[in-house]
């Protein structure tokens, strides 16, 4: 059962299904390979950085570290040397984030699979950063909270499932200047795309090659850290789940931390759910399911939000019910459904693996007001780097560790 305080913290969630729109078609993108490392490589597509990672956890981390070195170092410096030393409001008190990050890491370390620390070790080595700083930055998302949506079946023009995601996440932290689409092919895991920022291995917005997409929204319960960090729990679901039920099970069966809400969708079965996964609560809300605190339920839709944003979401969803396509789905994410702090918006079409991404601007204009870039995961997985592009050697794990110790 969702409590009123929990619901009031939820910024926005819609579950519905949409049809593709020809209006969103675009000319053949202009791409260029920037550099290669092992099986990983960096390219730009219409100017947007797309990072391809492939291999062991160490290799995934090292490839990101060397291929995005300047972006990673700049982002980490901004987060850890500037913003993390500024006081921010965390619940009822003002704190400096760096003051508590190490304690959070200590509590959560026993719950985090070793492969993720190995990946962060590789990232630190590739970017030539202190491992403790990389770890600290990757645990920052556990201290902050955001919003999302999705639509299906009778709610759309032809029944095709779409999953939308609105991330309202502290636009003043400058993360938008380090935005990157990362295509990850982990050894033994499901390939996935992570809409993220340089230097992060976890995910808050992603979709995998099995047509499962996930986005998160933060709630309350700050201080309940004894579990798997949200961003790594979501990453684990992307890397292992081959259908919606398996994705739900990842959240249900692992120890969770503070309160988060999620949208999970499966393009193979045209199913989607809203979900709350907190340290002490686990609830799944199906499309069209009524709840005393959610009076505006629609067929083939789930609408969760609060205050005026909830009213606007309901108004837009009702007005377009049965007619939505990809272009009008994007408009559902317009202000004021997206807040002024709107860092990125993503619209997924899990069945085809197409997705559209918009980021906030450097001058802090919300993502909802910016250009959307179109990608398709299945196509990204087939791309190959230009063999003439610069190649950076992939250092073996032991060699780098020993060299660092010698320094």
Image: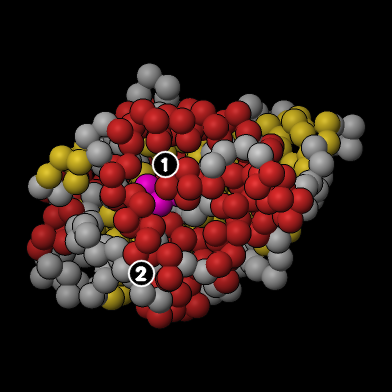
Q: Nearer the viewer, residue 90 or 262?
A: 90
**What residue do we see at 33% from left, 57% from top?**
104
Q: Is residue 164 left or right of residue 100?
A: right
Q: Is residue 301 magenta?
A: no
- The x and y percentages for residue 241 are 55, 72
**Res 359 visible:** no
Q: Looking at the image, is mark 2 or mark 1 nearer the viewer?
A: 2
Main SS of the magenta part reads helix
**Res 140 visible:** yes
- The x and y percentages for residue 24 are 55, 38
Residue 349 position (above or below residue 95) = below
Q: Nearer the viewer, residue 359 or 254?
A: 254
Residue at the limit of the structure toward the front, as seen here:
406
Q: Which residues are magenta?
A: 137-141
Q: Which residue is mark 2?
A: 227
Q: Which mark is residue 46?
A: none
Residue at the limit of the structure toward the top, as seen here:
363
Q: Secondary structure at mark 2?
A: loop
Q: Quadrant of the N terminus?
A: bottom left
- How packed is label 2: few (under 14 Cα within 10 Å), some, or many (20 or more)? many
- How packed is label 1: few (under 14 Cα within 10 Å), some, or many (20 or more)? many
Tell me where residue 166 sits by quadrant. top left
**What residue do we see at 82% from left, 41% from top?**
393
Q: Nearer the viewer, residue 406 or 250?
A: 406
Residue 325 position (above or below residue 32) = below
Q: Which mark is residue 345?
A: 1
**What residue do we see at 62% from left, 37% from top?**
128
Q: Is residue 140 magenta?
A: yes
- The x and y percentages for residue 329 are 40, 46
Tell me where residue 398 sits by quadrant. bottom right
**What residue do we see at 50% from left, 40% from top?**
197
Q: Quadrant of the C terminus?
A: top right
């Amino acid at each position: 059962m969702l409590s009123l305080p929990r619901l009031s913290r939820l910024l926005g969630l819609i579950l519905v299904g949409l049809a593709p729109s020809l209006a969103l078609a675009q000319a053949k993108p202009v791409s260029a390979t920037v550099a290669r490392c092992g099986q990983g490589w960096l390219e730009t597509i219409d100017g947007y950085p797309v990072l391809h990672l492939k291999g062991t956890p160490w290799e995934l981390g090292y490839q990101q570290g060397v291929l995005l070195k300047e972006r990673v170092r700049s982002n980490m410096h901004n987060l850890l040397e500037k913003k993390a030393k500024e006081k921010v409001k965390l619940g009822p008190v003002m704190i400096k984030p760096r003051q508590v990050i190490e304690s959070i890491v200590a509590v959560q370390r026993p719950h985090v699979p070793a492969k993720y620390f190995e990946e962060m070790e590789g990232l630190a080595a590739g970017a030539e950063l202190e491992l403790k700083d990389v770890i600290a930055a990757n645990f920052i998302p556990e201290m902050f909270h955001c919003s999302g949506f999705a639509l299906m079946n009778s709610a759309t023009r032809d029944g095709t499932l779409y999953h939308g995601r609105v991330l309202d996440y502290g636009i003043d932290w400058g993360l938008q200047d380090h935005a990157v689409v990362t295509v990850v092919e982990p050894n033994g895991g499901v390939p996935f795309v992570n809409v993220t920022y340089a230097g992060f291995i976890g995910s808050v917005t992603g979709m995998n090659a099995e047509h499962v997409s996930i986005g998160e929204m933060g709630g309350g319960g700050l201080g309940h850290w004894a579990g798997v960090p949200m961003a790594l729990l979501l990453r684990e679901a992307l890397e292992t789940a081959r259908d919606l039920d398996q994705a739900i099970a990842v959240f249900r069966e692992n120890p969770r931390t503070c309160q988060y809400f999620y949208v999970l969708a499966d393009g193979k079965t045209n199913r989607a759910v809203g979900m709350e996964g907190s340290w002490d609560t686990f609830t799944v809300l199906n499309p069209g399911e009524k709840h005393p605190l959610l009076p505006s339920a629609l067929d083939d839709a789930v609408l969760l939000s609060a205050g005026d944003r909830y009213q606007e979401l309901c108004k837009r969803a009702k007005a377009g019910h049965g007619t939505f396509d990809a272009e009008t789905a994007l408009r559902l994410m317009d202000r004021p459904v997206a807040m002024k702090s709107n860092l990125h918006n993503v619209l997924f079409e899990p069945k085809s693996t197409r997705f559209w991404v918009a980021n906030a601007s450097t001058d802090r204009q919300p993502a909802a007001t910016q250009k959307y870039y179109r990608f398709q995961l299945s196509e990204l997985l087939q791309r190959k780097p230009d063999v003439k592009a610069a190649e950076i050697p992939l250092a073996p794990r032991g060699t780098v560790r020993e060299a660092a110790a010698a320094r």
